[in-house]
Amino acid sequence: MTSPNLDIALFTSAQARTIDQRAIGDLGIPGFALMTRAAAAAFGMLRQRWPQARRLRVVCGAGNNGGDGYLVARDALDLGLAVDLVALEAPRGTDAMQARDAFVAASGKVLSWNAWAGLAPADVIVDAIYGTGLNRAPQGAAALAIEAINAAGLPVLALDVPSGLDADTGDCPGVAVQAVATATFIVHKRGLHTHRAALAGDVERHGLDLPGSILEAPDARLLVEASLPRRPRDSHKGNNGHVLAIGGDHGTGGAVRMAAEAALRTGAGLVSVATREANVPAMNAARPELMAHGVDGPQALQPMLDKASVVALGPGLGQAAWGHALWTTALDAGLPTVLDADGLNLLHTHARALPEKVVLTPHPGEAARLLGRDTRAVQTDRFAAVRELAQRYGAVVVLKGNGSLIASPDGQVSVCPWGNPGMASGGMGDTLTGIIAGLLGQGCEPYEAACLGVALHARAADVAARQGERGLLAGDLLEPLRRLVNGLPA
C-alpha cells in the first residue's frame, strides 16, 4: 500500500489505536516512549505558540491522555516553568502511572480537583482529560473541570482531542473543552474536521517519527486547493456545457438566479433558466447573459432540456403542482443533475430513480428527511449519514455544514477544511448548486465536481469574509469564485 498523504488523511479512533499498537508491537517502541515523544511535541508546540508563558495549569485524566499531560508538565518543570497539575483521578495503566512518577520525580506536585479554586493564575491550560476513546458525555469531576477550563478565560492547548469532542464524529454529547489549539498525534482524527470541530482550534499533527509502514488506508481525506486547467485557445461556448437551472416559483426567483449566475461564474459556456414568467424581466435586466424563459409546465420545459447538457434542479422550485411537474420532467430526461432544496424535498415525498450522474446537496435537515430520522441523528454521525445517503440513492452526496462532507456511492468521503459562519445566510446553497452544475458542464465527473465545487465555494466565502462574516451575501462569492476557479490569487 502506498503511504497516504498524512497532511490530508483522516482516520477513525479505532484506526489510530491500531496504528499505536503496531508501533508498539511491530516496531518494538515501548508505549511510554511514544508517550514521551507525544509530550515533547506538544510542549514544543506550546512554547512556540505562547513563548512568554511562565505558568501552566495541566488537567489530567486517568488514561494515556492524562499520561501525556503528566509528561508535558514534567518537561515544563525541567525548563523552569511553574506547573499546577490537577489530577481528576489516579492514573490507570502502566504507561500513565510511569508518566505520573516521572512528573513527581521532577519535583512536581499532584493536586486534586478540590485545589482548583485556590490556584494561582496561569498563562496556558493544558487539557489532558480524555483522548480519542470518549464517545459519551463527560460526567462528575471531568464535566466540572471542563466547565472550569472554559470559564477561566485562558488559552487552552488540547492534547490529541479536546476533551468532550468525539474524535470520530465531531459531535459533543455533553460539555467539551474550547481549545485555542490541539496537538494531535501520529494521524489526523476525522472528528477534528467537521460539525463541532471548531472546538479544537488550530489543529497541528505531530507524526512522532513513525514510519508509513504501520499505516493503513485512511477513512476519509481533506480537500486540497484546486482549480480548473486553462482552456485551449480554440475553446468556444459549446465546449463548456449548457446548464439549465430550473426553479424560482412565485417569490423565490432569486434562488434560481443565484444558482444560474454561479454556474456562469464557474465557467459554464451557456446557462438557461426555466422559471415563472414573472421572474424573467428582472433576470434579463440584472444578468442578461442568462437565457431566462418563463415555463408553465412540462411541455414548455422539454425543448430547453433537449438543448441542455446539465440540470441544476431545485432552487426555489417549490413543492406544489408546478414544481413537481418540472421536477419529474427534468429527472426523466436523465441528464447529469445537481439536486438541491425543494428538489430534495420532492425526492423525500416522491421516491424515484435518479439519473446516472447526480449530485445531491442536502443540509442536515434535508438529509434527515431523506433518511427518515431527525436532524440531531444526522449531526451525531455525519460520516455515517453521508455514506448511507450516497449508497441509498446511488449518488454523490454533499452533506453541508461546518466541515461539509462529500461521499460517493463506493464509500469515498472528502471533508472541506474551509468556510466560515458568515455562510449561514440565504442563497449560499443555491450558489453551491450552480457551481457544481457549472463544473459538470465543463466535463468533471460527479465526485470531482462536488469536491472541487465545495472547495471553491468555501474558499470564495473565506475571501469574501475578510470584510466581516456578518452580512456576507451569497452574491459576494462570485468575484472571488471567478478568480479561484482560474487558479488566480484571490
Image (cartoon, helix red, strand yellow):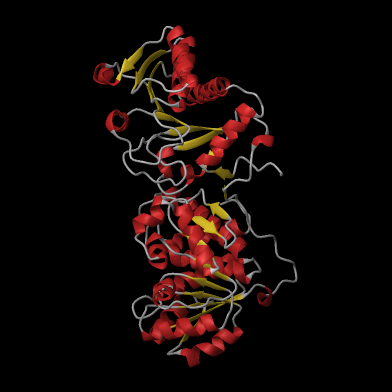
The answer to whether 8 is drawn above or below residue 95 in the figure is below
**Can residue 464 be seen by looking at this rendering?**
no
Give the x, y percent position of residue 328.
47, 83
Which of 69/16 is in front? Answer: 16
Give the x, y percent position of residue 109.
37, 11
110 to the left or right of 462? left
Image quadrant assignment for residue 87 = top left
Quadrant, the N terminus: top right
Give the x, y percent position of residue 48.
51, 24
The answer to whether 167 is drawn above or below residue 226 in the figure is above
Give the x, y percent position of residue 477.
48, 59
**Can residue 238 be seen by looking at this rendering?**
yes
Image quadrant assignment for residue 385 = bottom left
The answer to whether 481 is drawn above or below residue 92 in the figure is below
Residue drawn at point x = 44 percent, y = 15 percent: 100
Which of 81/251 is in front? Answer: 81
